[in-house]
Amino acid sequence: MRSTNDGAFAEGKTAKGFSLRVIIPTIVICLGVLASGSVGYFALREAETGLRHGAEVQLTLTSQNTARQLQRVVTDTQTDLQAMASGATMKQLVAELPLAVELSGDPGEIRDAYHNTSDSPAERAEVMKGADNLYGSKHEGIHGDFFAQWQTGGYADMLFFDLDGLVLYSVTKSGDFLLSVEDKVFETTPVPDLYTAALEAAPGQVLSSEFAAYGPAGGVPSQFVATPVYTEGFGSVELSGVVMLRITHSFFNEILGQPLLIGESAQGYLLDDKGLLLSKPVRAPSAPLLQPFGGLDLSIGDERSGSQTLYTDSKAYQLAPIDLFGQPAVVATEISRAEVSAASSNVLYSILTVAVSVLVLVLGAALAVALYISRPLAHLSSAITRIRAGKLDTRVPGTHRRDEIGDIARNVDAFQDGLRRERQLAADQEADRAQQRETAERLVHLNAAFDNNVTAVIADVNAALRQLESASNQMTSVSEQTASEAQTAAAASDQSLQGLQAVAGATEELTATVQEIDRDLARSNRISEEAGDKALQAQTTINGLETAAGRINEVVSLISDIAEQTNLLALNATIEAARAGEAGKGFAVVASEVKELANQTGKATEEISSQIQAVQSETRAAVGAIHEVIQVIGEMNEVAAAVTSAIEEQAKTTGEISQNIQQVTGGSSEVAQAINKVSDMAVTTGEGVEEVRQAISHLEQRAHRVTELVDGYLRETKAG
């Protein structure tokens, strides 16, 4: 009890660091600061709003005034263009220059004559005659008026196109002078389309193109404004060509190129309907034209009826739309937001001065209020600290007060009475707890006895389960060993069966080989017999050949006798011719030739007789060889007959071996089936043992569950 009071007292000392004498002044000061800050903040907001509104008004008025001036210039330019198209100088140009170009020769020479005067368009514009031909003379008569209008209007160029599309006249004589709209230099420019549209326009109608880079003038972004030229001829008005003004950013410099008076950072510039820059800003003269500028990404479209104010992080913009010769555009006026808000710094200083003064007054009032409230609260806090320390006879101050502090004091006094009653109630509860401890000790002894008895019974059950599990493990081991031995025997039986099957296959192959040999020997016997027959036929043929050779030899002998007799007749004829003298010389020559022929016939018959004798000798040798072949073939037939008989015996023996092996293979298959049955029975026995083990495991789980229930019951009993 004493330690609890000491802890409470320690907590009270810690809480005393957050005294109301500090908290209340702090809260009042914070409220004062909050009030002063709020007033200053809203005052600054109002000041900033007023300053920004004033800047917006100035920006709007400046932008609208610039837009009105620029719109007035655009309108005046349209009027000047219409007046130019119907003026006397234009009529003179239409009447004189076409014929002058035609009579002056090559237009290229005219163009070169003007281009050679100067490289500057402004200096070329000052040249009156330029070429020493009819075109130069006519040009001098009309150029003065157009040159004056060009200077006054601030245009980049003034051009006249005839009905063939030829640039018949140009003030600056740039790269488009005396070229046709169909020339390559105009392909990427808006001139051809604008020229075609102007030919179809009504008198006095003004047309325009968008700003685009113009190649013949060095790629300077340009806009073209055009109107058709009509002249009177023979009582009617006829279309004579198109006059165009080329406008660049310098056209807007007189209005947009002046510094604005609303601020040092203020400037104005012209944007097209895609937000692309069309004029040179005063404070950014190097900004590229036809590119986004000012951090704006806008699309004006067809909404050109009113102004618009936009803001970015650093600038404020006022946009005033205008009609730029029929093309939508906008005059943008910008100013730095930092410059607009610079005037608010003085207002902020004044507001801070007032806020600090109010804060000082609030701080004094806060201290007075804090002393009035914190002193009685300090006395009351001291009394509460003694009550927390266990001194329940402490006098509580301030119970007579009629304010909130008095209410707190009376509540503390009532709380002290409650603590005294709680102390008496604690003593009564201690006596009740002593009686409950005695009852609990008796219940513990009863639970201990129950625990010992149940534990012994469960131990006996567990021992019996362990013995049963050991027996089932032995049965499992025996079953697994039996299955293993059966599998080994089955494997050996399968291996033996495979060997017998291999022997049976080899025996069958041997039988097939013997049968093949038997068939080959039979075929060999047939061939030998055929060879014997052929040899006998050859012997008969050769015998006939020998007989024919003998007959040929007889014929040759006869021819030889005839040749000898012819030789004798030729000799006699030669003798008779010699006797006849000159009359028998021709017969002597014939006799000599017959004699020579008889000698040649004799030699031929001798050669034929020699060859026939050689044939007869070879024939007799062939007859002897064929006779020997017939004898060998006979011997081969006898040997083949003996081999055939032996092969037949071997085939019978091989068939018997194959039959026996097939019987042995069948028996081996039956043995293998019996071994497989033994293996299956072993597996079945193992499954039965496994079921017994699972039943034992289930019993062990139930026994363990009984143990847990008993232990839980005992724990709950002990806890209760």
Image (cartoon, grey):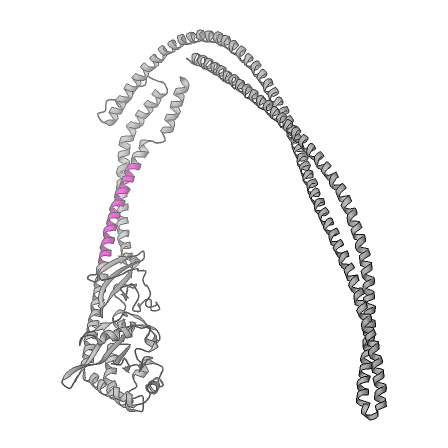
Question: Can you give x and y, in whole percent of width and height, for residue 709 in the image?
Answer: 45, 14
Q: Residue at x 86, y 90 (%)?
A: 579
Query: Magenta stretch containing residue 398, yes or no?
Result: no
Question: Can you give x and y, in whole percent of width and height, for residue 393 in the image?
Answer: 32, 16
Q: Nearer the viewer, residue 261 or 569?
A: 569
Quarter of the image where one finds residue 576: bottom right
Judge from the rendering whether residue 602 lies leftward or rightward of residue 231; answer left or right.
right
Q: Nearer the viewer, residue 32 or 145?
A: 145
**Can you see residue 407?**
yes
Q: Nearer the viewer, residue 687 or 170?
A: 687
Question: Can you give x and y, in whole percent of width and height, for residue 491 in the image?
Answer: 64, 29
Please, is residue 522 above or below residue 434 in the view? below
- Of the 4 image quadrants, the one containing the N terminus is top left
Boundaries of the magenta span: 26-54
The chief SS type of the magenta part is helix
Please, is residue 461 above or below residue 89 in the view? above
Question: Can you give x and y, in whole percent of width and height, for residue 422 in the image?
Answer: 33, 15
- Of the 4 image quadrants, the one containing the C terminus is top left
Judge from the rendering whether residue 241 lies leftward or rightward of residue 440; answer left or right.
left
Quarter of the image where one finds residue 19: top left
Please, is residue 601 above or below residue 527 in the view? below
Quarter of the image where one finds residue 122: bottom left
Residue extending farthest to the left is: 235
Residue extending farthest to the bottom is: 582
Judge from the rendering whether residue 567 lies leftward or rightward of residue 643; answer left or right.
right
**Can you see residue 487?**
no
Q: Nearer the viewer, residue 598 or 654?
A: 598
Query: Magenta stretch containing residue 31, yes or no?
Result: yes
